[in-house]
Amino acid sequence: MAENSENTDESIIIIEENEAAGLKNENEEIPPPPKEDDEAKHKKIIILAGAGIAFIVIAITVTIIILKSSDKESDIEPEMSFIETKLQEKPTKQIEPSKLENMIAKANYLYSSGSKSDALFLYEKIATYSEAISLYNLGVAQLKNKQYAIALSSFKKAISNDEKRCVSSINAAVCSLHLNDEESFKYYIDLAQVYLSYEVDSPLYSYYYSLVNYYNNNYLEALTALKHNPSDEYPQVQKHLKSKMLALFGNNYEAIEVMEKQLSNEDDFNIALLYSRIGDYPLAISYFDEAIKKNTQPIKAQLARGLTKLKAGAITAGASDIKS
């Protein structure tokens, strides 16, 4: 552009010079234009060369900036895309089922004790966590906290989502029992029977098999599975089921042996009944005493202790327990 500018200026100057000469005489010799001296020419060349170099440098710089800018944009684009994807994802909160159970128990206590606003706040918090855990685990937590109707709903959803269908059906049947809904109980225990075949390779198969047969009143099959194919899971439940069915078949000594292997604080009442059945009244009475102290079914324990004292010949003491 600097070069074009110079040429334009020169032509203007030349035109002005010709016009200033007036009318031309064809025979008159036109004098040559005055020559520029060497120093002026040299300066002009330097200026033009400098301007050209400056233009080239500017053009190269602008090109580099544009290229770098496009590279940065291409680098930023996938990063921004990744961030946008992460932002669009719903945040989830992970929580262990045991902690969820404690939260539900606390919410239930607050609600029953009159602190309804605090309870509702905690229920809302539980709702946000419940989306992050399985429906089955949520149902188990609700079942343990005796929320049978809500737990039944959770197990129904778990079955619909193909999540632990066999054990979800068993637990749905248990909820139905607590709700005194015999028709619903029968439906879900039959459903568990259907899904049992899908659990053949599971380490819990024998346990599920025992439960399904127990709730279907097939006690011999349930007991056989517990005795010959025991699972390592849920030892206390298996122990109680085995002892109960052994006692049902009159095997009281074997039932006592099973109970005493892993005796817990909640077992005092049950083992007292078994000792009373075989006629060991002093030992039965001592276990009833423990059950009353630990508040394990205290009313039933006191009544059973009174009846046991009557059998043992302690009429007055037995009558006092029964009257009380």
Image: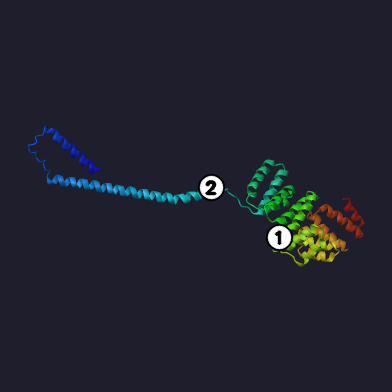
Would residue 84 appear left or right of 42 to someone viewing this image? right
Q: How many marks?
A: 2
Locate residue 22, reporting x and y percent.
11, 32
Locate residue 39, reporting x and y percent.
13, 46
Q: Is residue 303 visible?
A: yes
Q: Residue furthest top?
A: 22
Task: Please report the residue visible at 79 percent of the width from the left and 59 percent of the height from the top.
Answer: 214
Task: Please report the residue visible at 73 percent of the width from the left and 61 percent of the height from the top.
Answer: 197
Would residue 124 appear left or right of 247 to someone viewing this image? left
Task: Please report the residue visible at 18 percent of the width from the left and 45 percent of the height from the top.
Answer: 44
Residue mark closest to the camera, 2 vs 1? 1
Q: Residue furthest front?
A: 26
Which residue in the protein does label 1 denote? 198
Locate residue 241, reporting x and y percent.
79, 60
Q: Which numbered marker is on residue 253?
A: none
Task: Please report the residue visible at 26 percent of the width from the left and 47 percent of the height from the top.
Answer: 54
Which residue in the protein does label 2 denote? 87
Bin the neighbour count of mark 2 within 10 Å (Cα to Cα): few under 14, some 14-19, many 20 and up: few
Foreground residue among 4 and 302: 4
Locate residue 144, reporting x and y percent.
72, 52
Foreground residue among 44 and 230: 44
| Amino acid at the residue labelled 1 | Tyr
Q: Is residue 236 visible?
A: no
- Which structural element holds mark 1? helix
| Amino acid at the residue labelled 2 | Leu
Please tell me in which quadrant of the rendered image residue 165 appears: bottom right
Bin the neighbour count of mark 1 within 10 Å (Cα to Cα): few under 14, some 14-19, many 20 and up: few
Q: Quadrant of the N terminus?
A: top left
Q: Is 140 rendered above or below residue 203?
A: above
- Which structural element holds mark 2? helix
Badge 2 vs badge 1, beta-carbon distance below 8 Å? no
Mark 2 vs 1, N-terminal side: 2
